[in-house]
Amino acid sequence: MKLKIRHILIGLAISCTLAAGALDLPVRRVNGKDYYVYTVQRNESLLDVANKLDITRDEIINCNPGAADGVKMGQKLYLPVSDFAENNDKVAGATSDGTMLRYKVGKGETLFGIAYRFGVTPDEIAELNPSVNAGVKAGDIIMIPAAGQKNRTESARELPKAQHVTEAKPVIAPEGTVADKGERRLRPVNPPVVYVEPDSDDTDEVPEADTMEVEPRIGVVDVDVDEPVAGDTARIALMMPLMLEGDELAGRQSKHSLDFVRGFLLGVKSMAGSAQPTEISIIDTRESAEVIGGVLRSDSMRDVDVIIAPEDPASLKPVVDGADGLDTYILNLFAIQDTTYMTDGQVIQANIPAKLMYAKAAEALMSIYDGYKPVFLISKGGRVEKLPFTDYVRGLYAEMGVEPIDMAYEGMLSHGDLENLDVTEKYVFIPGSGSVAEFNKFARALLALRDDFADPSYVGLFGYPDWTAFRSEALDNLHRLGATVYSRFYNNETNLDTRMFNAEYERQYGVKPLEQVPSQAQLGYDTARYLLTNINNNGGLYTPENQPLYTGLQSSFLLMSDNDYNSNEQEEITGGPVNQALYIITFIPGAESVDIKVL
C-alpha cells in the first residue's frame, strides 16, 4: 500500500529579523517556518531574557510585539531559526569549514534533535553519515551540512508542540503484514505524533502580530511500503485538536486526541501490506470554527473520502457545515448523543444510538435470562441514572404479561431483604444505576443469595457499560456473580492482542497509552484498521453500509441506515448510516475470562 501522510497546520505569519548566536532551544513550526521557542522563567525581565539569549531587547520585541509591555513567567517568545543559521558553527561541539560542520554528539542527543538544532533535516545528515540510520550516541563525530546548502523538505516533524525530539525507530511490520524492505523506514508514520509530550502542561502562546493569517499549510510525505496497484487513491482526514490552549478541558481533549492519533497511526502501520493506495491527512483544528472552515474550503480537502470529526461536540457543526457540498463522509466517533446523522446523509454516527441500544440490550436480556423472573433493584435515595433503560424493559415485560418484582432497600441491600425469594425459581436482578458505589450496595447480598440456591446460575445479574471499567474487588464480584452487561465497546486488558498493542504503543512512542475506558488509543487503532479494510475490500471506495461486521480490539463497526428515528413514515429518509454493533459481555465465574458477543 502506498500511504501519503499529510499534516495541515494553522498558525501566524510573522516577519522579523535577528542578528544573534545559535540557541539550544525547542523548535516549533508556525506557518511553514521554524521558530526557536523560549519560555520565560520566574522573575525574568525582558532584559534578562535578551542578555541570556545574547540578543537585544528590540530584536525580541520585533518578533514578539506583545513583549513590549513586559514578559511574565511561562510566556513563550518565538525567534526564527533561519536568522540564526549563519551562526550554527557557534554551537558547542561544532566546528566548520564553511560548507559543513563537524559535530560531536552530546549525552542524550538524538538525530532529530541535532537536525533541528542545526536547521537541517535528518535525511541530510544521514546522507553524509549513513551510520546514523542505526541511531547516534554520545561521543559520535558526525558531519552536518551547513544550513542553506540544500533545500529543506517538508516532513513529519511539522507537527507543532514537539517539546523533545527522539530518534525515529525502525518500523517493525506486525505479524501478518508485509515487512518493510531494506533499511527504509516509515518516517511519516513514526514521527508525526511520537515527539509530542503527552503529559506536558505546556501550552503554546503564538506570537502577537498586527495581521493574522488563517491559512492551511500543508506538508506531504509519501511512504512507499509496497508497490501500489492501479486505482483511485483513497483519502482520509483526521481533524483533531492537537494544540488546544487555555483551560483544563482543552488540555484533556488535546491529550485524548493525541492518544487517538497515535493509535490510528499504529493501525495504519499494521495495514502496510494492503494494496490500495491511501492518503491520510492529520489536521490540527485548534477547536476553532474559523480554522475548521478554512481547512475545509481548501483545495486539499476536495477529494477526501472520510473526515474523522473532533472529540468536542461543538466542533462537529462547523465540520458538517464546512463539508457541505463535498463528496465525503463525516465519521462521528465521539459525540455519542449527536443526532445530525438523522437529517444529513454525509454524517455517520459511529456509536449505536440509545433507542437501538436499549432494544438490542433488552433482546439479549430476555434471551440469556429466558424463564427468569425480573427483579428491579431500587436504591432509596441512591442513583437511578439508568431509569430510561429500566422503564423500557418494564414496558416490554408488561407487553409479555410478566410482572416483575420491585426490590426496594435503603443503604445496603441485605441478605434478609431477599429471604422471601423461592430458591427453586430463577431470578435476574436489574439495578437502576451503573455506578460502582451502587453496585457495592447489593453485590454481597446477591453473592450470599447464590450460595442459598442449589444452582447459583439461578441468580442472574444484568447491567451496564459502566461495569466494564470496574477493577479490583468490584471486578472480582462481577465474575463471581456471572454478570452480563451491554456496552458500545469492550476494553479487555487481559487479552493477548490488547497486551501486544499496548507494548507496541509504548515501544514506538516511549509512553503508555492513556489509562481510560474506553481507550482512545485503541479506538484510533480500530478505526484505522476498519477504514482501510473497508477501502481495500471495495476497490478503493469507502462503502459504509451493507458491509460485514468489523470487530477490533475494543470497538466494532456494523453500519446501516436505520429508519426507526423518523417520526413520519411517509417522509423521505435522508439520514446517514449508524453503527448498530453492541457488545454483550458475560463475566465467567471462577475465571478471569469473559464471553463476548457482538449483536
Image (cartoon, rainbow, N blue to C red):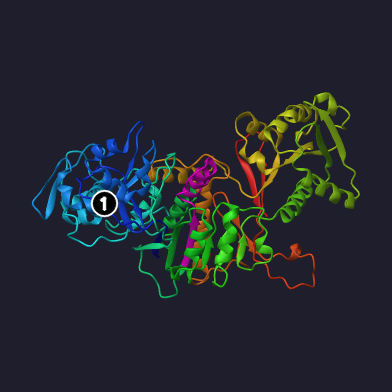
> Where does the magenta region start and end?
235-258
Name the one closer to the observer, 594 or 532: 532
At 26% across and 38% down in the image, what residue appears?
Answer: 108
- Report if residue 242 lies within the magenta region: yes
Quadrant in the picture for the C terminus? bottom right
408 sits to left or right of 217: right
In the displayed image of the protein, which residue is found farthest to the left?
97
**Is 220 placed above or below 311 here?**
below
* Front-most of residues 301 and 554: 301
Q: Which residue is mark 1?
A: 81
Residue drawn where x is 76% and y is 54% of the image = 359
Q: Position of residue 382 (x, y in %)?
A: 77, 32
Name which residue lies at 40% across and 63% down: 3
**Residue 26 horizontal side relative to residue 258, left or right:** left
Vertical position of residue 331 compared to residue 312: above or below: below
Q: Is residue 61 magenta?
A: no
Q: Is residue 533 visible?
A: no
Residue at 44% across, 75% down: 231
Q: Position of residue 240 (x, y in %)?
A: 49, 54
Q: Amino acid at mark 1?
A: Val
- Percent across and percent down for residue 262 are 44, 50
